[in-house]
Amino acid sequence: MFWTNPLVQTAAIVFSALAGLSLIIIRIRAGKQPTTLKKIVIPPLGMATGFIMFAAPVTHIPWLWGLSAFGTGLLIFAFPLIVTTRMERVDSDIYVRRSKAFIAIMAVLFLVRFALHGVVEQYMSIPQTGAIFYLLAFGMIVPWRVAMVGDYLRLTRLGVAERS
């Protein structure tokens, strides 16, 4: 079968590592420019289009597995991102400021995901594994971005109050 080919599995790992590295680079570069509500909200909305993968039977997983993956992202993996991401007002602009630990946290999250990937692959196909980790990532990103929106709106209101 195509999914059990070692070359396909290696390519999936390499692609995942490159995607993780790209994410870290993009997040670091984003901190050098002011942010907007649109820049905070669009990534999870764009990522939500990934739910279409579940139209393909090869990605179907039991509901409990999907809920568990989403809940793990929501309750465990989102926390370090929320804690290390802060908004800062500079003049009339708002910037996303991350702690020095941000890269380390992203790397640890990637390594944990990578380690779990090998365990999960023993019980399901690569497309199902991708579906599980997509749900985990979505569960991690949504609360992180909701927290960012809250910080952004708070700083926006503070800026309006300061001008009054």
Image (cartoon, rainbow, N blue to C red):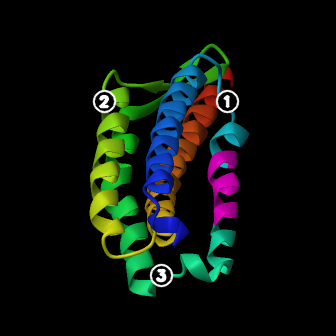
Secondary element under disc 2, as helix, strand or loop, is helix
Q: Amino acid at mark 1?
A: Val
**Marks 2 and 1: which is nearer the front?**
2
Q: CA distance from mark 3 to mark 2?
A: 31 Å
Q: Earlier in the sequence, mark 3 or mark 2?
A: 3
From the viewer's side, name the closer residue of 37 and 101. Answer: 101
Taking depth in this image into account, of 148 and 140 the one nearest to the observer is 140
Q: Secondary structure at mark 1?
A: helix
45 left or right of 73?
Answer: right
From the image, tell me which residue sits under label 2.
104
Residue occupying image coordinates x 51% and y 23%: 28
Quadrant containing the C terminus in the rendered view: top right
Mark sitting on residue 114: none
Q: Is residue 23 left or right of residue 40?
A: left
Question: Which residue type carries mark 3?
Answer: Ile
Disc number for residue 61: 3
| Residue at the (65%, 22%) spot, across then down | 34
Assess whether residue 98 is covered by the magenta stretch: no
Q: Is residue 99 above or below residue 84?
A: above
Magenta part of the chain: 42-50
Q: Residue at x 45, y 72 (%)?
A: 125
User: Of helix, strand and loop, which mostly describes the magenta segment?
Assistant: helix
Identity, as a three-letter code, of the amino acid under mark 2 = Ala
Rendered location of residue 149, percent (x, y): 57, 45
Q: Helix or strand or loop: what does disc 3 sit on? A: loop
In this rendering, which labeled residue sits more in front, label 3 or label 2? 3
With 40 as the anchor, is 67 left or right in this view? left
